């Protein structure tokens, strides 16, 4: 999987993409805990391809009424605040830039100066 991701980053510049945020859709927490380790912010170059600005985590904190193709069995609310975010994604969110959510919150990660904006979906 990681090689395919690196290949995608490399070929995106051929298509005119200079920067992007890879997106993960609603999944169970164990998927996020596994997959987030592989996605890193990185500066783009001719050899490395496009800039990876940070991850966009679309779900699982989205509206059941506006879920689209997201699997309903994995949707969650944010009643527990930032603890719910850490329980779902893990404590290291240094490579995350956007979290899409039904509720609007701005959290400041307690370990770093990372600011995570959670947008209304």
Image: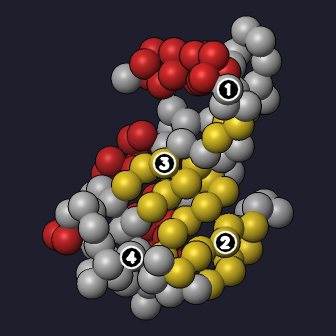
Task: Name the secondary structure under disc 2.
Answer: strand
Determine crowd level at label 1: few under 14, some 14-19, many 20+ residues with C-alpha closer than 10 A.
Answer: few
Residue 112 at x, y percent in the picture: 78, 60
Residue at the location (49% across, 43% down)? 36
Residue 57 at x, y percent in the picture: 49, 58
Q: Are marks 2 and 3 in contact (CB under 8 Å)?
A: no
Determine which residue is flagged by label 1.
16
69 sits left or right of 29 in the view:
left
Residue at the location (27% across, 81% down)? 64
106 sits left or right of 85 in the view:
right
Q: Which mark is residue 40?
A: none
Q: Residue furthest front?
A: 16
- For marks 1 and 2, the one nearer the N-term is 1
Determine which residue is flagged by label 2.
117
Task: Name the secondary structure under disc 3.
Answer: strand
> Mark 1 or 2, which is nearer the eye?
1
- For marks 1 and 3, the one nearer the N-term is 1
Determine which residue is flagged by label 4.
62
């Amino acid at each position: 999987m990681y090689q395919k991701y690196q290949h995608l980053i490399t070929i995106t510049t051929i298509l005119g993409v200079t920067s992007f945020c890879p997106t993960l859709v609603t999944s169970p927490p164990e998927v996020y805990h596994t997959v987030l380790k592989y996605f890193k912010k990185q500066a783009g170059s001719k050899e490395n391809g496009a800039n990876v600005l940070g991850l966009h985590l679309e779900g699982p904190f989205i509206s059941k009424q506006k879920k689209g193709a997201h699997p309903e069995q994995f949707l969650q609310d944010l009643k527990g605040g930032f603890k719910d975010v850490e329980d779902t994604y893990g404590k290291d969110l240094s490579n995350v830039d956007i979290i899409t959510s039904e509720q609007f919150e701005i959290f400041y990660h307690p370990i770093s100066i990372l600011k995570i904006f959670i947008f209304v979906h």
